Amino acid sequence: MPKDIGSMFENEISEELAAFGEPSYRAAQVFKWVQSGVKSFDEMTNVSKKLRKKLVENYYLSSAAIEKKLISDYDGTRKYLLSFHDGEAVESVLMQYHHGYTSCISTQVGCKMGCTFCATGKSGFSRNLTASEMLAQLRAEQEDAGIRISNIVLMGMGEPLDNFDNVVRFLKLVGDDKGLNIGMRHISLSTCGIVPKIYELADMKLQLTLSVSLHAPNDQIRSRTMPINRKYGIGELLKACRYYIDQTGRRISFEYAMIDGVNDSSANAQELASKLKGMLCHVNLIPVNTVGGTGYQKSRMDRIKSFIAVLERAGITATVRRTLGSDINASCGQLRRSYIKEEGSE
Ligand code: SAH
Ligand code: SF4
């Protein structure tokens, strides 16, 4: 079985090459080629033919092929369906902000968490992505759009903390100056709240931004829309968030999808405010994206405004997230769902 060389650190490649009797400086060269995104080992022009042959026999290079692409007429947001060597496909979204390009990538094919409002949650789970497959999404986008990505959000398909080791490996590789060189301060990781993994991440003291998908002010509502809450309730989750802030000094961003009649009343806002009071945090309100079959509708704008007003009176900053690419269903999971339907016999 060929090994995934694109997910290896330089020292790991060094150990591999030592087994072939290669000097250690070769590892630096090979690592640099791999992280620069070469598509074949033959492109490694300063590596001997003999070693290239060994590499071809023992390793593979991940790539992401564009299966579908949608470009928003409003704001140029690009949404991609990208497939890997085994035919599995995920979504990535490339957005342009005034400060540069942000890519929203996937960390798993599907998701096990089953949140009721989420298109990804509805289509089940196939497998974890490797670090090199996360990197391949970024490279495919850069190449297609002819741009350089400056910011990354792990908010595509999948629950990053349910694929912890591969995600941490990705975070380290993407920050390497021989590779894409995108530092932790330019990366956000969004989680539905896998509490033990939040502690583990906090102890690593990375300078990334943690986004927590809260979406409800109490266990009763949250357990109804997010099954993970039956395992780790809001009290436990917020305790882990406080620990994260203490360890890293970083502000947490709470995501809150506004669902008409479910979690958007002033009483809900008050309850949320009382729980978040005094925390180094920001609340992002997102009018829920209607996904077929869920029966959920977006909250009315006046409800969203009063919700914000309640939070602000309690000293908690809140904004409504600007929705980019709304004409192309840019929220993740929806493009893959339609693709699976087309591929199947339905
Ligand atoms: N699994 C992680 C990251 C991927 S989901 C998480 O849940 O945080 C990225 C974000 O999109 C999360 O905040 C998620 O709650 C939100 N989301 C999912 N479906 C949505 C929908 N239909 N409308 C609005 N936000 C949604
Ligand atoms: Fe998974 Fe996040 Fe969707 Fe929940 S919201 S099902 S955790 S991808």
Image (spheres, rainbow, N blue to C red):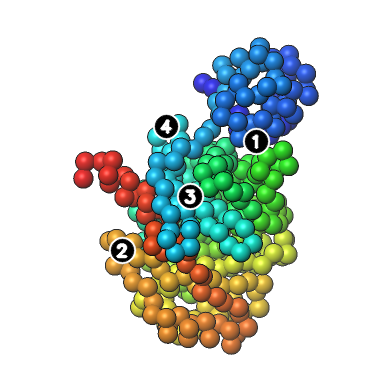
Whether the residue carrying mark 2 lies under 8 Å from ligand 1 is answered with yes
Q: Looking at the image, do the residues carrying marks 4 and 2 touch, with CB atoms under 8 Å apart?
A: no
Give the secondary structure at mark 1: loop
Horizontal and vertical percent position of residue 125: 40, 45
Which mark, by number, is residue 218?
none
Mark 2 or 3: the one toward you: 3
Give the label on residue 92, or none: 3
The residues tagged by marks 3 and 1 sit, at their Cα atoms, a distance apart of 20 Å
Give the residue at x 34% y 72%.
Answer: 297
- Label 1 CA crowd tier, 10 Å (few <14, some 14–19, many 20+): some
Where in the figure is residue 89, as x and y percent of width and height?
41, 41
Tag 4 residue: 86
- Quadrant for residue 45, please give it: top right
Vertical placement of residue 261 versus 232, above or below:
below
> On the picture, is 227 further left or further right than 196?
left
Callout 2: 10 Å neighbours few (<14), some, many (20+)? few
Mark closest to the chain's N terminus, 2 or 3: 3
User: Which residue is more in the foreground, 193 or 168?
Assistant: 168
Given residues 158 and 86, the one toward you in this image is 86
For badge 4, the amino acid type reads Asp
Q: Amino acid at mark 1?
A: Ser
Mark 1 or mark 4, earlier in chain: 1
> Dot 2 corresponds to which residue?
294
Residue located 48% across and 41% down the image: 128
Distance between mark 2 and mark 3 Cα atoms: 23 Å
Location of residue 196 in the rendering, given as x and y in whole percent from the top left corner: 58, 54
